[in-house]
Amino acid sequence: MAIRKKHLGQFPALGHREGKTGGQAIDETGGGGVMAKGESKVIMRHGRVYGIANLINRGAGLILLPVYTHVLTPAEFGLYASIVIVTDILSVILGMGLGRALVRLHVEQQDEAGRGAVLGTALAAYAGMSLLIALLAYPASLIASRHLFGLEGETWVFAWAILGLIPSTLFNLQLNYIIVLKRSGFYLFISIVKAVLLTALSLWLVVLLNKGVFGIVIATLIGSTAVSLIILIDMYRTTSMSLSRPILAELLRFGSPLVPTIMLDTIQSSLDRYVIGSLQGSSALGNYGLGLRITSLLNLFVTAPFMQIWGVRQLEVLQAGDENRELPQIFFRFMLTLIGLSVGISIFSDEVIRLIASEAYAPAASVLPWLACVQVLAALRSYGELGLHYAKKTSPLIGISLTSLLIGAPIYWIVALKFGIVAIASVCAGVMLVRTGLTLLWADRHSSLVRMFPWYSFTAATAVAAVCVTGTFLLPADANLLEILAAKIGILMAFFAAALALLWRAERASWDSSALSSRWWWAGRRIEREV
């Protein structure tokens, strides 16, 4: 039933204009259909705004990171990393895969009533799960703090962090809706508000009042609540939301298989930190956690803003029944950029740590190359997952995640007992390679995207990156600082020169990668077109 009849407000969906076809969106690039020419311009325009918004939105965390590493000891930063592990896992249960399901079902809708029903039903489902999480916050905190991490007296810090999940996860769900409407201007506005709030609250609580990790938790709770309420008010004013049982069933049908998949992925991505914290102590976890925070900036500032617009456009292409090769080519350009940034972080790992942290965090530099590699592989995996999301063939992802978890868990434990955090970071990269490979192999059976990616040029780029990073570690230890910096800059420039050559080749050569999938023994069983 309809909640309220409203009209679209002052924040229209950028990139579309309303035609005289009952509100049907018309592609602004000209021509009929959802997609036409100029994909690069459309993605660059919105992606640039999303990138600036994410830079502002996450800029608070970037600014506060050196503050935390100077105010908090490695042991206290390890406590913060432990809280992040727990909240990451619970956020998967709270989110129920609604964000991805909302985007997928929104693309299918042909009118405003259908899109409003998707939004209203998703928010109602989220409200029910939020109530359950709130009731279980303290019991879950008790188990996590005392039994998982052996921390006495920190239960309420965990409890407040779990309560803070409710507005922060709602905020992420709301961002999915803003992104699918291509309201990049509103996305930028809300990012500025959140960044200002989070920075001011964190500096006040952590630095001035010296509340430590508890101050970080409370600042996040208050900031997320404020911006979520702003977005809810805007949604109420601009969208005719309604509730629909069929849409609820479809949301759960699409999102439910993603929950165990994302849960297993989250456990897998948290397992390295849990093993380090349990076997090597909070200080080692703090150093590893700092390296993870730095490399995760690649996802926050590069991968996330790109996927926010590219993913929606690619879904629109698939929905239109078009196999446009321009979008996979754009993804290849993005991957070259991501690899280049990862190489830069790896080459200048020592300088990065010295720039933002105290000497106590020096061991964190050694894990940066491996964890940067994880970010590259994770972005590549999202390419295959997008095709599976459109084909609604997400159930086997559970098996892929479970397989990688069963492979990684004993290896993590053995390595943590005998080696340090560098070895664990290398295992993390190896496990991610397995997960990405299995995902792409399965996606090849159900999506044409895999067969439209220039795999030969991408493989060459990764090989060049590996050679450049390895060459950095072979530099003579007795060289002076200026010589080392000059050599590192030269190595980085050499990579970018090779990347430009590979990009030139990929854009001018034939798409010979289309024959790649036919080499697999089960290729005859794959689905050749999207249904």
Image (cartoon, rainbow, N blue to C red):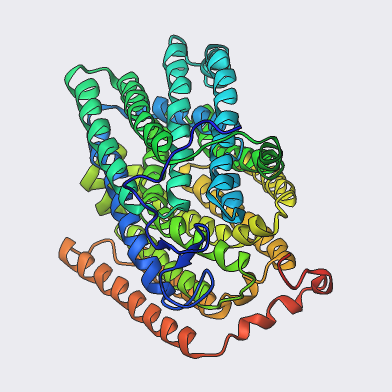
Q: Where in the figure is residue 396, as x and y percent of width and height?
A: 75, 51
Q: Nearer the viewer, residue 281 or 214?
A: 214
Which quarter of the figure is the C terminus placed in? bottom right
- Is residue 408 shown above or below 496? above
Compared to residue 491, the image places residue 422 above or below, namely: above
Residue 434: give x, y in percent of width and height.
Answer: 64, 57
Give the number of marks: 0
Which residue appears farthest toward the bottom when viewing the image?
Answer: 509
Q: Which quadrant is the N terminus positioned in?
A: top right
> In this image, 203 relative to 276: left or right?
left
Instruction: Report the front residue among 346 and 127.
Output: 127
Q: Residue at x 53, y 72 (%)?
A: 328
The residue that appears at 46% across and 31% down in the rendered structure is: 84
Q: Is residue 409 visible?
A: no
Question: Residue 294: horizontal and vertical position, in percent?
Answer: 35, 47
Depth order, front residue of 182/242: 242
Where does residue 126 sit, x and y in percent of width and height? 56, 30
Is 258 left, or right, of 473 in this rendering? right
Does residue 141 appear in this view?
yes
Please say if 492 is above or below 284: below
